[in-house]
Structure formats: structure tokens, C-alpha cells
Image (spheres, rainbow, N blue to C red):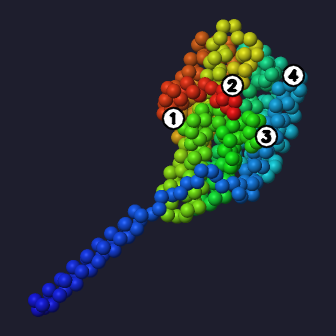
């Protein structure tokens, strides 16, 4: 090979290397110059009603079951277990098939939550060691162990059915605007995002969104506001296409975390309410009933998250079991809920321990824990 030829070959290879570098640089510059995602100020709800018919029906079925269970709160009124089971297992979509198999099994069956509620209805609850089947006290219906089955069913299904159904949308290979609508609906919000579950607004929030609103001080930084902002961001990112996959992932992960934190914050709120009423000197029967009602809500909100796919939650099943044990309602065992009222000196510290565990799991601040004591919707009259 002559010197001249070798020199020409070298020059050509050098030219190709330079052109390749320039091309790569231009490509990188083009990617770096991707326009920032344009996020609107409001959520586009044009197709919300059409996209969320199934989700609204599922929530409606939960409301029907809850209304039937509430009949048992009236002294002397018995609730038919067959009517309860029918409401749980029928409808489209049905609650039982929309729930985690774990929690659906707890609700149904001869010794399930619905059966225990029906057995307790029509009687009168006497606080103390378990006797009989339970009954009403202070306007609520408790089983013989002092726990309110109505709350275990309703609040448990906020996680075991509604959030569980949302996880199926989270796993979609390619999200669509309709998917975002479904997530918002299952959370209980709507395109107006009123941040209120009161009748003061035209379209109030429901289910978990209603409780998230209670935990939100309406300063733009709270859990409800975070959910709203990330729903708007996610909708914008999905509409913008595949170039904004990173933004989609960021917003979706934030939605999941915020939803779960709102659930945990609500459990903490009910822990505070339980401690406040049962640590008082000589609480009245109504105070005790209200405390056990609040406590039962907390148990339901927590237990419903057990067995939800771990990829879509922070808390683990082991941590849920730990806190359920602190709540005297261990999974798979007979609860001893009444002890919080009959032996508050020795039992109530467990409620504070549960608050501390939730604080650690979700990295809540001291101020967060203090703020969670309040219903900010009522405080601010919104």
C-alpha cells in the first residue's frame, strides 16, 4: 500500500469520525431541546363521565352496601345477611370480584364481616368481656368484641377494591387519557377538584379524596393539592406523547404515593380521636362509642391495603400486621377492641405506638402529625 493511499484512507476515516461526532452531538442537542411539558392550570374533564362509568358504578355499589349496613345502627333493627351478601356479590362491576381475594374472603363467608354485622344487629352492646353477638351503643353497631364491622367493610374496601382497581390501570403498558380519568374517579375526585367533601360545593369529593381533603390545609401544598397537581401533570404528559414518558412516570408515582399517604394520614387522625375520647376522665357511653367508631375506621383503612401488589405501595404486609396487632385486631385472630375502653391505662399506649410507626413508615414530620388531628374542611368551612 503506497504512502499516498494510506494517507488518503486515514483522511477519510478521520472525516467519518468527525461526521459521526457531529451527528451524535446534533442528535443530543435535539433531545436536550425537547420543549418543556406544558401543564395547564386545570384538568380536562371533557370525556370524564364517559370514561368512568364502570368506576362510578363500583363506588355506587359500595354506597348501596354501606347504606344497608348502616340500618343496623338503629336500636332493634336487624339486618339480613343475605341482603348484605347480595349487595356485595352482585352489580356490575361487583364488589367481591373487584376486591383483593384476601379482603373479599374476610368480608364474605359464614364468619365474615357481613355475617358478624348481621348477628350483632338488633341487639344492644354491653361494654366489657365479649358476651352474645354485640349490638348498638351510642348510635353505632359493634360486634361482641367492640369493633364496628361496618367500618371494616366500607373503609377496608377503599383500599381493597378502589385502590386495588387503580393498580390495574397503573400497570398499563401505555397510559391513555381515559386511564387518568379512571384513576381520578377511583380516588373519589372529579375534574373540578373542589378539595371539599361538604355540601358547600356543587360536586364534592368522595371516598378517599374526601378524606384527603380533610387532611389538606388548602394552602396548595397538602396531600389533596399534590394529587390534583400530579393528575393534571400526568394528563398533560400522556397527551404530549412518548417523548414525555419520564414526566408520566414521575406524576404517576407521585399520585400513588399521595393516595397512600392520605390513607395513612386518615388512620392517624382516627388514632388521635380515639386517644382524645378514651383518655378523658370518666368518658360517657357516647364518647366511648364514638371512640370505638373512630378506632374501627382506622382499622378498616389500614387492613384494606394488605396484599395489594407491593410495587404500588410503601407499607408492607408485615408492617400492616404489626400495626393491626397494636390495634388489638390482629389479622386472622379474634379482636379485643373493647380493651381500649375497659383498660385505657395499659391499652391506649398502643394507639400512640401505631401513630409512631405510621410516622416512620411514611416519613411524616412532627407538624404533619399535629395537622392530621384536624378536619380542615370543617375548620375552614369550605
Query: Is residue 309 shown left or right of residue 281?
Result: left
- Look at the numbered disc 1 and give the secondary structure of its residue: helix
Position of the C terminus, as image quadrant, is: top right
The correct choice, above or below, for 228 with respect to 361 in the image is: below
Q: Residue at x 69, y 25 (%)?
A: 294
The reply to whether discs 3 and 4 touch (Cβ–Cβ < 8 Å) is: no
- Look at the numbered disc 4 and give the secondary structure of its residue: loop
Q: Give the x, y percent position of residue 224.
A: 61, 40
The residue that label 2 is drawn on is: 294
Q: Give the x, y percent position of residue 196.
A: 69, 37
On the image, which quarter does residue 198 sit in?
top right
Cα separation, mark 1 vs mark 4, equals 40 Å
- Looking at the image, is mark 1 or mark 4 earlier in the sequence? 4
From the viewer's side, name the closer residue of 238 and 265: 238
- Looking at the image, is mark 3 or mark 1 earlier in the sequence? 3
The residue that label 3 is drawn on is: 63
Query: Is residue 239 shown left or right of residue 24?
Result: right
Residue 75: which disc? 4
Q: Residue at x 69, y 20 (%)?
A: 291
The reply to whether discs 3 and 1 touch (Cβ–Cβ < 8 Å) is: no
Cα separation, mark 3 vs mark 2, equals 19 Å
Residues packed near mark 1 inside 10 Å, few (<14), some (14 to 19) or many (20 plus): some
Amino acid at each position: 500500500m503506497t504512502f499516498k493511499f494510506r494517507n488518503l484512507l486515514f483522511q477519510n476515516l478521520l472525516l467519518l469520525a468527525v461526521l459521526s461526532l457531529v451527528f451524535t452531538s446534533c442528535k443530543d442537542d435535539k433531545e436536550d431541546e425537547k420543549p418543556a411539558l406544558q401543564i395547564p392550570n386545570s384538568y380536562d374533564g371533557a370525556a370524564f363521565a364517559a370514561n368512568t362509568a364502570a368506576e362510578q358504578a363500583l363506588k355506587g355499589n359500595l354506597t348501596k352496601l354501606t347504606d344497608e349496613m348502616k340500618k343496623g345502627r338503629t336500636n332493634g333493627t336487624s339486618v339480613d345477611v343475605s341482603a348484605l351478601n347480595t349487595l356485595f356479590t352482585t352489580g356490575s362491576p361487583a364488589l367481591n370480584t373487584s376486591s383483593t381475594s384476601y379482603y373479599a374472603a374476610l368480608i364474605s363467608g359464614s364468619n365474615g364481616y357481613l355475617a358478624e354485622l348481621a348477628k350483632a344487629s338488633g341487639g344492644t352492646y354491653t361494654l366489657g368481656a365479649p358476651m352474645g353477638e354485640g349490638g348498638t351503643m351510642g348510635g353505632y353497631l359493634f360486634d361482641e368484641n367492640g369493633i364496628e364491622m361496618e367500618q371494616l367493610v366500607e373503609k377496608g374496601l377503599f383500599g381493597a377494591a378502589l385502590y386495588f382497581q387503580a393498580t390495574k390501570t397503573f400497570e398499563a403498558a401505555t397510559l391513555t387519557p381515559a386511564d387518568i380519568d379512571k384513576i381520578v374517579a377511583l380516588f373519589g375526585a372529579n375534574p373540578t377538584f373542589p378539595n371539599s367533601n361538604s355540601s358547600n360545593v356543587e360536586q364534592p369529593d368522595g371516598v378517599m379524596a374526601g378524606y384527603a381533603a380533610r387532611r389538606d390545609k388548602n394552602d396548595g401544598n397538602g396531600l389533596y393539592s399534590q394529587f390534583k397537581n400530579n393528575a393534571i401533570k400526568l394528563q398533560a404528559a400522556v397527551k404530549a406523547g412518548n417523548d414525555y414518558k419520564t414526566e408520566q412516570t414521575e406524576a404517576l408515582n407521585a399520585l400513588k404515593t399521595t393516595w397512600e399517604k392520605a390513607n395513612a394520614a386518615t388512620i392517624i387522625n382516627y388514632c388521635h380521636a380515639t386517644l382524645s375520647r378514651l383518655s378523658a376522665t370518666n368518658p360517657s357511653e357516647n364518647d366511648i362509642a364514638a371512640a370505638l367508631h373512630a378506632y374501627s375506621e382506622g382499622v378498616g383503612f389500614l387492613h384494606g391495603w394488605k396484599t395489594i401488589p407491593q410495587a404500588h405501595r410503601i407499607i408492607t404486609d408485615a408492617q400492616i400486621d404489626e400495626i393491626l396487632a397494636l390495634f388489638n385486631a390482629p389479622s386472622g385472630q379474634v379482636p379485643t377492641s373493647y380493651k381500649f375502653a375497659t383498660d385505657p391505662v395499659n391499652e391506649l399506649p398502643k394507639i400512640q405506638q401505631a401513630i409512631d410507626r405510621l410516622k416512620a413508615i411514611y416519613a411524616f414530620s412532627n407538624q404533619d402529625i399535629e395537622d392530621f388531628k384536624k378536619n380542615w374542611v370543617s375548620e375552614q368551612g369550605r
